[in-house]
Image (tube, helix red, strand yellow):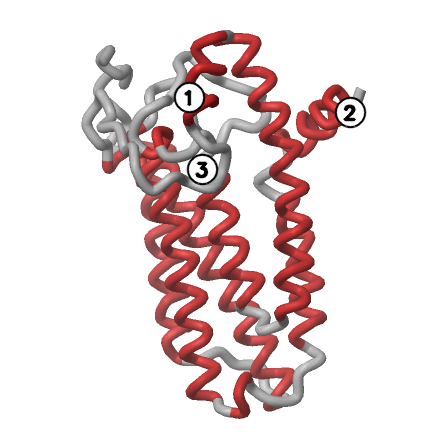
Amino acid sequence: MLKIEMCRHGQFLFRHRTYLPLVLVPFGIWQILQYDRYVGGSHDFDRIWDWACFALALIGVAVRFISAGYAQSGTSGRNAKSGQIADALNRRGMYSLCRHPLYLGNLIMYTAILLFTKSPWFALAGALALFIYYERIIATEEDYLFGKFGSAYTDWSATTPCLIPKLTGWQKAGIAFSVRAGLRSEFYSVAAVVVSMYILDIVEHYAVEKTWRADTEWNVLLVSALAIYFILRFLRKNTSLLDEPGPRVEAQA
């Protein structure tokens, strides 16, 4: 059946979901190399576009950060090799607006990077590819959650949209927001966005000016993002500063 086939594909995509979207990067580089002038014919306008894309990407990071900060222990995370994990069902906080806020955050970030190429056709094709990609991952994840939580999951999904968030109905989480959880999870996202856009900016300058360089602000941003990445990565792997003092479980409404 189609559902079984989608779930089978989704299991593979879920295990490799951290790296598979990077397949789009070479195509984005190739697209930029076709340019011979900046967007709107002006470098200043081009830089405004770049920063608008970066701001959009930060919105995606913020969605993920808030989602991770309100998530219960043993649920949302970057687990890949261990497969699906769900010791509890997140239904409040960001999860009261849509069922998959982490994937929503990803889609916003990836769309921002696609738009950074300044090619509407490439951005549209990439967005469609990502939609199909996440459709299969979500099908696999929801099949797992239904099997584990049954009617509790179907009741929640009946009133909560999948990816496009509803604008009303926010339910306050039964646990306090954890900055530690957000930092522990999302310092990867910021570094990935900055590095991706930095590379594309260099390629764009080469395509237009035939020189390998990046704008000064991107050099500063790259150094800052990498410094934060390595500091937080060290703290996560070698200290307990980003660890929670105990399990995070929501109080029952």
Q: Is residue 32 above or below residue 185?
A: below
45 sits to left or right of 235: right
Q: Nearer the viewer, mark 3 or mark 1?
A: 3
57 sits to left or right of 20: left
Considering depth in this image, is 48 or 180 the residue closer to the camera? 48
Q: Is residue 240 above or below residue 166?
A: above
Residue 207 image position (x, y, % from top left): 64, 83
- Taking the spot 66% from the left edge, 51% from the top edge, the residue there is 128
Name the residue type under label 3.
Leu
Name the residue type under label 2.
Leu
Q: CA distance from mark 2 to mark 3?
A: 25 Å
Q: Which residue is mark 2?
A: 2
Residue 246 in view here: yes
Q: Are marks 2 and 1 in contact (CB under 8 Å)?
A: no
- Taking the spot 73% from the left edge, 22% from the top edge, the residue there is 3
Task: Tell me where residue 225 sits by quadrant.
Answer: bottom left
Name the residue type under label 1.
Thr
Q: CA distance from mark 3 to mark 1?
A: 12 Å
Considering depth in this image, is 85 or 42 the residue closer to the camera? 42
Sequence-wise, the earlier of marks 2 and 3 is 2
Q: Which residue is mark 1?
A: 75
Q: Check residue 102 in the rendering and tell me which mark sits there, or answer none.
A: 3
223 sits to left or right of 108: left
* 10 Å crowding of disc 1: few (<14), some (14-19), many (20+): some
Considering depth in this image, is 144 or 77 the residue closer to the camera? 144
Sequence-wise, the earlier of marks 2 and 1 is 2
Residue 83 image position (x, y, % from top left): 58, 21
Q: Is residue 1 above or below residue 67?
A: above
* 10 Å crowding of disc 3: few (<14), some (14-19), many (20+): many
